[in-house]
Structure formats: structure tokens, C-alpha cells
Image (cartoon, rainbow, N blue to C red):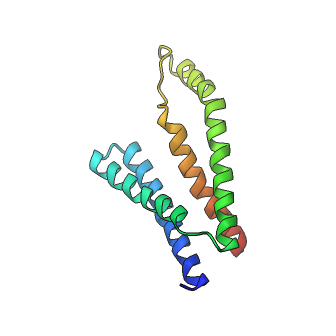
Amino acid sequence: MTPEKRTQIYLTMAHVGFLASMGFAAAHLLGWPDFFKGLMVGMLLLPLAVAPLRRMRDEYIDSLWRAGTAWAFVAVVASFLFGPFLEGVYDGYTGAPAHQDIPVEAAGYAAILAFFTGFHAEWLKGRL
């Protein structure tokens, strides 16, 4: 397989993952049936499973991967640092009793979304 073809496969997987994460967010926010949420999760797992299995021999893809993982790390740290604060602000603003309104899974979803955002930001930065 040529390096250009390998790069194209990685970029296609990144695009599929980003679209699947957007679809999952839409399905969750718009209250779509669980089937669509599961379909989007399956589409999201495919690129995340294929990318590490393939050897990253290309320095360009390696730099994109590193940018995505850096963004994901920042998202996880920010979620755990600022999540309780945002929870308290939300409870204070709505006057609701103090209970967990933001699910714990939000940190994981934020990390996946940040990974694909960082990957695409680095990709677009290289193309401009």
C-alpha cells in the first residue's frame, strides 16, 4: 500500500469519526431513539479501532494523531476540573436541588469530540 493511500485511509476514518460524533450529539440532544445512538457509537468505534491497529509509519498522520490526543487530554482535565463548578452554576441558576444533572459520561464524550476536533484543526492548519 502506498503512503498516499494509507494517509487517505486515515483521513477518511477521521472524517467518519467526526461525523459520527456529531450524529451522536444530535441523537442525544434531539431525543432520537436508542437505535440511532447505538448506530452512531458503532460508527464512532470503527475509526478509533482501525487507526491504532494500522501502523503509523507516516509522520504526517502521527502529527495529526498527537494533536488529537493532546486536545482530548485537555478536554478530560477540563471536564474534571470545571465539571463540578458548572454543575453548581447550573443548579444555582435553575434553582434546582443539588443533584447531578450533567452525566459522568460527558467527560468521555468531550474527549472523543476534542480528539476529532484537534485532529481536524491540525489537518486544516496544514492545508491552509
Q: How far across and how far down the image is residue 112, in percent?
A: 54, 50
Compared to 114, does 7 lie above or below? below
Left/right placement of residue 48 relative to residue 32 reads: right
Seen at 49% across and 67% down, the residue is: 13
Q: How far across and how far down the image is residue 99, in percent?
A: 47, 18
Left/right placement of residue 125 relative to residue 44 reads: right
Q: How far across and how far down the image is residue 108, in percent?
A: 52, 42
Q: Quadrant of residue 87?
A: top right
Give the mark count: 0
Compared to 113, does 91 lie above or below? above
Seen at 64% across and 61% down, the residue is: 65
Left/right placement of residue 48 relative to residue 70 reads: left
Seen at 50% across and 60% down, the residue is: 18
111 or 5: nearer the viewer:
5
Q: How far across and how far down the image is residue 85, in percent?
A: 63, 25
Seen at 53% across and 64% down, the residue is: 51
22 or 118: nearer the viewer:
118
Q: Quadrant of the C terminus?
A: bottom right
